[in-house]
Amino acid sequence: MNALDLAIIAVIALSAVFAFARGFVREVLSIIAWIGAAGITLYGFNSVYAITARFVTTPLLADLIAGAGLFVISLIVLTIVTGYLARFADSGALSPINRTLGLIFGLARGIVLVSVAYLVVDISLPQNDRPPWIKEAKSERFLAKGAEVLRTALPESLQVKTGGVADDAHRALDRAQEAQKAMRAYSSPTAPSAARPGQEGAPSYNAGERSEMDRLIKNTR
């Protein structure tokens, strides 16, 4: 067990303990409050911006004040409302059930968080380029399964093959390096193409070689 394994356990444990202390209802209502604040900001931004723009002449600053202000105010109001609702679940016979469900919710949330983090690594780093502390972690197989579940749950337009982004970047870099070498050879004073047509040492590149250089140049664009 290495440092990554310990970090994974710590994240999941902290999430579970925090959710157990707060209770399931409060945790769910907290998420609803954040989503609600984001929705209010999205739909009410234009109206608030129209008012803010009257007093702030800088468009960017007016955007920030309108967006951040509306979101923060909405979040505070919704948090107060959801806090009152959560108190009913914390009292009486529902409290043990609320705490137990909170613990389960916290464990699930921790697993999702570490799976999302691994999914980002999975997309951005090919398997061969990953550091040893990731490859040697005992939790790596568990993280890979969680990341795969999350990836398949995404819409098809957002699904990215594991390591695909990094692999594409490496292939693009290789093509650029090949094209750079071809251009250097083509523009070199000693290259056969430096001679003028009709003179001794006329270009000795055949059609296939010129076609290959054109292909490399086009692939880098």
Image (cartoon, rainbow, N blue to C red):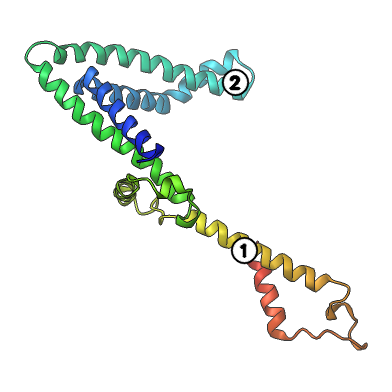
Give the residue number, with chain letter if any, for mark 2: 61
Taking the image as shown, residue 169 lies to the left or right of residue 85, namely right
Q: Is residue 178 above or below residue 212?
A: above
Label 1 is placed on what type of residue?
A: Asp
Among numbered discs 1 and 2, the one appearing first in the sequence: 2
Give the residue number, with chain letter if any, for mark 1: 174
Q: Residue furthest front?
A: 1
Residue located 31% across and 15% down the image? 79
**Callout 2: helix, strand or loop?**
helix
Taking the image as shown, residue 94 lies to the left or right of residue 41, namely left
Q: Nearer the viewer, residue 54 or 175?
A: 175
Image spot of residue 4 (x, y percent): 39, 39
Q: Is residue 215 above or below residue 31?
A: below
Name which quarter of the figure residue 191 lies in. Answer: bottom right
Q: Which mark is residue 63?
A: none
Q: Nearer the viewer, residue 31 or 49?
A: 31
Q: Quadrant of the N terminus?
A: top left
Label 2 is placed on what type of residue?
A: Leu
Front of the two marks 1 and 2: 1
Residue located 58% across and 15% down the image? 54
Q: Are there few (<14), some (14-19), or many (20+) residues within 10 Å of tag 2? A: few
Image spot of residue 45 (x, y percent): 46, 24
